[in-house]
Image (spheres, rainbow, N blue to C red):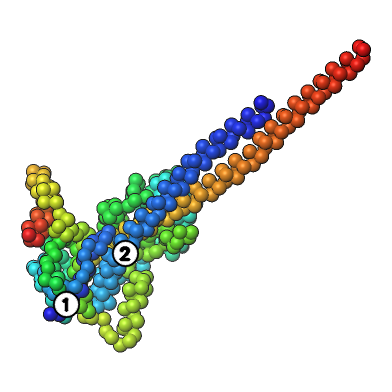
Amino acid sequence: MGAQIRVYKRRIRSVSATKKITKAMEMIAASRIVKAQRQVAASSPYADELTRAVTAVATGSNTKHPLTTEAENPTRAAVLLITSDRGLAGGYSSNAIKAADRLTERLRAEGKEVDAFVVGRKGLAYYSFRNRTVADSWTGFSDSPQYAHAKDVAAPLISALQTDTAEGGVDELHIVFTEFVSMMTQTPVGRRLLPLSLEDAGAVAEEAAVERKKGEALPLFEFEPSAEGVLDALLPRYVESRIYNAMLQAAASEHAARRRAMKSATDNAEDLIKSLTRLANAARQADITQEISEIVGGASALADANAGSD
Amino acid sequence: MAELHVELVAADRNVWSGEATLVVARTMSGDIGIMANHEPLLGVLHSGPVTIRTSDGGTVVAAVHGGFISFADNKLSILAEIAELADEIDVDRAERALQRSKSEADAGAERRAEVRLAAAAGAR
């Protein structure tokens, strides 16, 4: 066998081994998307009811709470960035990081200092490689976050919000994560969680606004123990649940991005194997042709020699 | 009898939903019973058992560890970070947790284990 064929055969073997791995990763990611989506769906009743309750307090009472009122001139903002722990997911983490950079840029232009909070090893590596300060970071749960993780993440953010800006607290809380739009589309988004703007609260607030236009006042709530007490207890839970929801969506997006990246890697490997097989076939054919011409050449040389001696 | 719709929701799942005639829960300022057509209410829950009398005469007891109760338009939602139905509670495990938390002087865990046991006992 010619040296050329041997080289091609070896490359085909190595590419098919890689293809097996990427194919397996693709299938694992595909099965996990479904699970992650189910988790997002399971967490939404809690998030919806909580948003409804927050909206009810904010519109149904004239209580002023530090977490719902905008500071007159905000000077510091916290940005929570959610990325993945592992790579091989295409542009998933870098797109989220870019979105966070854009948001940070915008906040700086508005004259606010930005504290970065990072979830996921990829985001943390990006920040530490560039020697940027990270106020706090968490790793190790990006692909299947639990509610306890969201609580861990929310705790320092909530305490920073409750601290005075002069003592290192923040006025605003933004969150950057990858929204799971569909299997094929995931978009990194930056949202402001607090101070609460009721326009952001989504469908529930819209519903309430529509009801008010119809002339039906929102039900007047009785608060137990008091409006302030309820709001005090409600807002941290609200932040936790929004962070939890963002982390779940980010996990679903991560799996979807990984599935897509691994699918194109598998397709690529298939193409490579096909073209390498073609080259190997051509090399084999060339070897055979050469062998035949050598035999024919040898035979005719022998025949010529025999004819000469007769 | 007038009925109200109840949704018992934990952070990561929907625990129970259905029609009920009476719901008793423990708020920060004491136990509260809610029947249909109660005035709109939003309260902070203490960890404790929540008892739901369903419209078919049965009783559902759940252990709820902190959370909120909100009632409007004859719809009651109980939101809790952690909520367990009484029949999901493993009594032996809760008892072990209670012993352990007592020996470690972990007040939070002790309270959780007590609430679990109370809910499990209330369902029997």
Horizontal and vertical percent position of residue A239 = 29, 62
Labels in figure, total? 2
Horizontal and vertical percent position of residue B31 = 8, 68
**Camera-side residue of A306 and A159:** A306
Q: Is residue A106 left or right of residue B36?
A: right
The residue that mark 2 highlights is A44
Evaluate whether residue A34 shows in this view. Answer: yes
User: Which residue, as the protein is rendered here, is positioned at the far front?
Assistant: A310
Q: Is residue A183 left or right of residue B72?
A: right
Quick one: SS at disc 2? helix
Residue at 35% across, 46% down = A139
- Above-or-below relation of A206 to A232: below
Which chain is disc 1 placed on? B
Evaluate whether residue B27 shows in this view. Answer: no
- Above-or-below relation of A30 to B57: above
Q: Do discs 2 and 1 share a chain?
A: no
Horizontal and vertical percent position of residue A177 = 40, 58
The residue that mark 1 highlights is B3
Spatial CA span between label 2 and label 1: 25 Å
